Amino acid sequence: MRIADAHMYRSMNSSINRSKDELARAQEQAATGLRVTKPSDDPGASAAARREASQQRLAEGAAKNADLANTRLTSADQALSSVSDLLGRVRELTLSSGTDTASAEQLSAAASELDAIRQQIMSIGNTRSAGRFVCPAE
């Protein structure tokens, strides 16, 4: 009879310990609001959560890259628009200066304005957006 009592004691003790573990796990889930607190709670759900977190990081990175590209493209568009306007003025100056009726003062003024336009175009070429040149020489 002693063996049966010892076996019954160990069995009951083991059952009580399992119940305490289950109670602790249930209390932790209730306190944190999380069903899976460690990978061994549910390996399938844990793997799905890791995949979902990875997908979220990828999506956030893509959104950040899209914002950066949009900023750079907007800056490049503005720079090209400015250069286009300046080249239009260069065309006007060269056409008006290329006639026989242009005086020396008009030619001198046109040359000064063309030099200023060249400086503006060089400045636009050195414009930076998001830490990089808008019009890279590469």
Image (spheres, grey):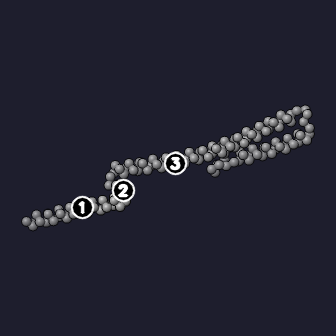
Viewed as shown, does residue 120 lie left or right of 10?
right
Query: Where does residue 128 sit, x and y in percent of width and height?
Result: 67, 49
Say which amino acid is labelled 2. Leu
The picture quadrant where one finds residue 134 is top right
Q: CA distance from mark 2 to mark 1?
A: 20 Å
Q: Pointer 1: residues within 10 angstroms few (<14), some, or many (20+)?
A: few
Of marks 2 and 1, which one's residue comes earlier in the chain? 1
Q: Quadrant of residue 12?
A: bottom left
Residue 4 visible to an observer of this rendering: yes
Question: Dot 2: what SS?
Answer: loop
Tell me how far mark 1 sits from mark 3, CA to CA: 45 Å
- Mark 3 highlights which residue? 61
Up-down: is 133 above or below 3?
above
Q: How many marks?
A: 3
Number of residues whose C-alpha sits closer than 10 Å to that of mark 3, classed few (under 14), some (14–19) or many (20 or more): few
Q: Determine which residue is flagged by label 2.
A: 34
Nearer to the camera, 136 or 15: 15
Of mark 3 and mark 2, the one earlier in the sequence is 2
Residue at 75% x, 44% y is 121
Pick out the residue farthest to the left: 1
What residue sits right under mark 1 in the picture? 19
- The reply, left or right, for residue 5 in relation to residue 36 is left
The earlier-in-sequence mark between 1 and 3 is: 1
Image quadrant in which the N terminus is located: bottom left
**Residue drawn where x is 44% and y is 49% of the image:** 54
Nearer-the-camera pick, 3 or 5 = 5
